[in-house]
Image: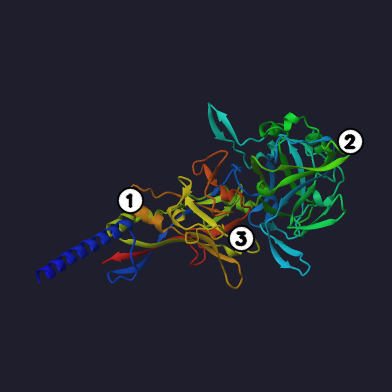
Amino acid sequence: MYNTSFIKKILLVATVVLLYSCDKDFNAIGDGLIGDDHFGLESEKYEVLAYNQEVTPIQSNGAANYGLGVYDNTVFGSTTASFATQVNLETYAPTIGDAPEIVSVVLSVPYYNHVKTTNTDGSRTFVLDSIYGASNGKIKLGVYESGVQMRSSYFDGGAQFLQLYNTDMDTDTGVDSYINFDKSKKPYVATGKPLNDDPKVAQNEEFFFDASEITDDTTDPTTGKVTSTKVAPEMRLNLNKAFFADKILKAPAAKLASADVFQEYFRGLYFKVERSGSSPANMALLNFATNGKITIKYKAKTAITTDPETTMEDKTLIIKLTGASAALLKEAKDSAYANAIANPNNKTGDDRLYLKGGQGSLAVLELSGFGAKLSEIRSKNWLVNEANLVFSIDTDKMAGTYEPKRIYLYNLDDNVPIADYLADAASSNPLLTKAVYSGILSLDPTTKRGTAYKIRLTNHIRNIIKNATVKNVKLGLVVTGDASIIASNKLKLKNSVISEAPRASVISPLGTVLFGGTSSATIPTGKKLQLEIYYTKPN
């Protein structure tokens, strides 16, 4: 009996200690189990001060994808995206061979796409992804040898720094010469000289992003047999052969020996975009660096000593579109949009929040209503179960325009993600990564148009409540082209509100209009931006 009683006492004490520890930890971290008899789940809503902030010229290098083309938006205006990049030989110190005779020079950059149908003969029909604007859009595209040597970094006082290139540097990019077809035969600058082989409208004056599958035919030089290979849609430009014969095949060997020397000698490419007359335009997001290349095919005297001296062999040299690169943007803003972001109301907030990628705009959020109640929340030991911001879309303004699939909320004071983003699970699909934190576009099941974006900031709010030293920071809100990218790009000229903006926003051409947190009569009932927190409140 004694032993049994002693064991029961020990178990009772252990149970009390365990329950006390759990309750202490529960209160410390702000977590709780919904449905406990001692707690009731209640919702509180708080005012949010939200206002617009213009993104002035900003660093545009360091991205994986870049826009190319012209995107017209009825709300925000027009964005023209050109592109500049360094180039690299796939293999340095190549053996060119004697008496080289150039056959072709083809620049290729794959498009993002997916297969729509596969036909009985094996051919495929594709749909291009990441294309914005008119489906039949055309642009005027010129490819130049850059007159500016781009660099990935520079040294100052013995320290190495990242070289920054900004969205407004289009006028700074010098041009030495055309290197692809140009129907007009007019140089971009007075010192430039077009080097045309055969003007082709579809490659310059009326270039379009073609979704057609490509067939490459290869003829065996011995048997004459033709082999056909199917290739997914990609940009293909036949560049000027004479230019590359002189620049590459006849270059001194020392100029092709290393990357540093080669990039000083051949300073890269400049993709210049303009409107194609009065034609509707569009824009594509492209990954130039991963698979973009220039393929030079030529013939040279064989190195096999037993062959006749006049025998020529087929050779290939590859130039990759890798190295430092930058988006070069020109924004022609709609007057109403330009006025809204130039004159933000940071006292009582704006009734419409304009989020626009590129050299566009973001929204600044201050959780002022929540901040005013912090002392009360802490003193009453309210426990946060969930906290959300729901951003309702102004569907009237956004009617007929492309909608960003995601938006991104971050700590604007420090230009870092909030705790909820960091704690959430990642995915290889940028549209699905961090799905609990979210920011994913909600669609109306009938119209298939966007209605709202919801972002969870539960851990962010808990951290502020738990620790009085944690600052109730300003939050930034932007559109995002890739929710997995959290790096920031620096503004050319910082201001009192922002010095950086998220890189994933800079690479996106899209925008959206959201209702703000004011009490304006122009905001429909139920659409006003508020912070909603669900608590369990001890009795």
Marks 2/1: CA distance?
Answer: 83 Å
Write down the residue under mark 2: 309
Residue 536's image quarter? bottom left
Write down the residue under mark 3: 403
Local SS, label 3:
loop
Q: Position of residue 78 (x, y in %)?
A: 68, 51
Marks 1/3: CA distance?
Answer: 38 Å
Amino acid type of the residue that numbered disc 2 sits on in the rendered structure: Glu
Crowding around mark 1 (Cα neighbors within 10 Å: few <14, some 14 to 19, many 20+) is few
The answer to whether the residue labelled 1 contacts the one labelled 3, judged by CB atoms less than 8 Å apart, is no
Amino acid type of the residue that numbered disc 1 sits on in the rendered structure: Asn
Q: Nearer the viewer, mark 1 or mark 3?
A: 1
The answer to whether the residue labelled 2 contacts the one labelled 1, judged by CB atoms less than 8 Å apart, is no
Q: Nearer the viewer, mark 3 or mark 2?
A: 2
x 48%, y 46%: residue: 415
Q: Is residue 268 above or below residue 208?
A: above
Q: Earlier in the sequence, mark 3 or mark 2?
A: 2
Q: Earlier in the sequence, mark 1 or mark 3?
A: 3
Amino acid type of the residue that numbered disc 3 sits on in the rendered structure: Glu
Local SS, label 1:
loop
Marks 3/2: CA distance?
Answer: 63 Å
Crowding around mark 2 (Cα neighbors within 10 Å: few <14, some 14 to 19, many 20+) is few
Write down the residue under mark 1: 467
Q: Is residue 431 above or below residue 38?
A: above
Q: Position of residue 348 (x, y in %)?
A: 46, 53
Residue 32 seen: yes
Q: Position of residue 391 (x, y in %)?
A: 51, 61
x 59%, y 38%: residue: 164
Along the viewing direction, whichever of 294 and 492 lies nearer the viewer = 294
Q: Quadrant of the N terminus?
A: bottom left
Local SS, label 2:
loop
- Which label was assigned to residue 371? none
